[in-house]
């Protein structure tokens, strides 16, 4: 049987042999993916890389990682960067329709893909819980929301993300198929369906159900408090995390559900080739939506976070305008230097309010 590869959790899309009928041909789908996906993912890579690097620079330069929220936001950006790091390799794979980087890189990049995915999910959950504690249990939060606790919980999250990604590291491998090398998940043949279903259930439980439950519980408590004691700064901070969470669901839910349908297609579909093709097309479309999430969080910070915009302007003044003046001495730099050296410490105890 012939296989086609895409850049997602189910990299192998088998062209099933339906009984005694002719094998289901998906050449057109592969050709469409090879034409459309590389330019789209290249755009995602460039925008996401620039945006998340700027987030890291702002956090390191101005927030100084003095709060637990800043630590979580930094780790969230790193999760996106890990995710983005794998993109150029999958783009090359899609363009050449052959894996050229060897078995070791296949395992490493596939595992890294899942580490970035699951760590992002877990850090969004931590950010939501962090906001909940700060507003609903403010007295307890003063003791619990420390930099030390933020570092410890971040380490735990990375360990959990690596554990969740172990199947990606272990089962991904290269294989020679007809005229090209593939890089994909190869589960044991005798338990192939069980592994695919386990992966789909794991993704939907950790990536959809768990964050949804946390969001409902936390934001229900937060909204009750804010309705009783309105606070503009707290409301801005909640709005930022809430928008990040909502966008995460909008971008990931279609993909999660498609992965679930893909893994359980032997139950959900009627063994029809046309339905299988539609499912493969849905996988490609939702995959594009999913990958663009790497660009979204920095944009959310810029549009929702007032303080982030101010810090970003200061960053540009310091690293662009001021240094540019060395080569263009006629530019006035006193005001720029004064602006870039302004202390950002005001309100630092209000943990990333408006960020």
Image: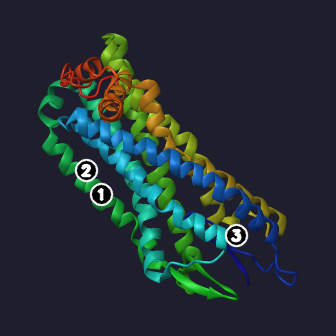
Q: Is residue 43 above or below residue 326?
A: below
Name the spot of residue 33 as percent of width and height, x first: 71, 62
Q: Are marks 3 and 1 in contact (CB under 8 Å)?
A: no
Label 1 packing within 10 angstroms: few (<14), some (14-19), many (20+): many
Name the spot of residue 93 as percent of width and height, x first: 60, 71
Task: Return the residue at label 3.
Answer: 266
Observer-nearest of 96 and 248: 96
Q: Are marks 1 and 2 in contact (CB under 8 Å)?
A: yes
Task: Return the residue at label 2.
Answer: 154
What's the residue at 40%, 66% (across, down)? Answer: 165
Q: Earlier in the sequence, mark 2 or mark 3?
A: 2
Residue 217 occupies which quadrant of the picture?
A: top left
Q: Is residue 47 visible?
A: yes
Label 3 packing within 10 angstroms: few (<14), some (14-19), many (20+): few
Q: Identify the coloring.
A: rainbow
Q: Quadrant of the N terminus?
A: bottom right
Q: Is residue 272 visible?
A: no
Task: Return the residue at label 1.
Answer: 158
């Amino acid at each position: 049987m012939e296989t086609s590869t895409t850049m997602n959790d189910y990299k192998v899309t088998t062209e099933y042999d339906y009984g005694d009928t002719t094998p289901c041909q998906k050449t057109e789908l592969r050709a469409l993916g090879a034409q459309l996906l590389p330019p789209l993912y290249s755009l995602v890579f460039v925008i996401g890389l620039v945006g998340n690097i700027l987030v890291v620079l702002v956090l390191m330069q101005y927030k100084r990682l003095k709060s637990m929220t800043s630590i979580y936001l930094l780790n969230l950006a790193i999760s996106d960067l890990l995710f983005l790091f794998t993109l150029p390799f999958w783009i090359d794979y899609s363009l050449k329709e052959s894996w050229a980087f060897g078995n070791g890189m296949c395992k490493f990049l596939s595992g890294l893909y899942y580490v970035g995915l699951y760590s992002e999910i877990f850090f969004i959950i931590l950010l939501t819980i962090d906001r909940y504690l700060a507003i609903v249990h403010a007295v307890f939060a003063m003791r619990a929301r420390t930099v030390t606790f933020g570092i410890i919980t971040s380490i735990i999250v990375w360990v959990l993300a690596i554990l969740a990604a172990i199947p990606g590291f272990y089962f991904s491998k290269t294989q020679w198929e007809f005229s090209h090398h593939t890089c994909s998940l190869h589960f044991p043949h005798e338990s192939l369906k069980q592994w695919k279903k386990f992966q789909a259930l794991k993704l939907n439980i950790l990536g959809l159900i768990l964050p949804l439950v946390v969001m409902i519980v936390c934001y229900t408590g937060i909204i009750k408090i804010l309705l009783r004691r309105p606070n503009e700064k707290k409301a801005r901070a909640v709005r930022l995390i809430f928008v990040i969470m909502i966008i995460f669901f909008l971008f990931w839910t279609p993909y999660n559900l498609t992965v679930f349908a893909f893994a359980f297609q032997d139950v959900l579909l009627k063994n029809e080739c046309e339905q299988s093709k539609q499912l493969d097309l849905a996988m490609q479309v939702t995959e594009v939506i999913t990958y663009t999430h790497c660009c979204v969080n920095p944009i959310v910070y810029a549009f929702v976070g007032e303080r982030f915009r101010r810090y970003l302007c200061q960053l540009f003044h310091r690293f662009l305008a001021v240094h540019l003046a060395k080569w263009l001495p006629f530019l006035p730099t006193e005001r720029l230097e004064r602006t870039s050296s302004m202390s950002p410490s005001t309100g630092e105890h209000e943990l990333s309010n408006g960020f």
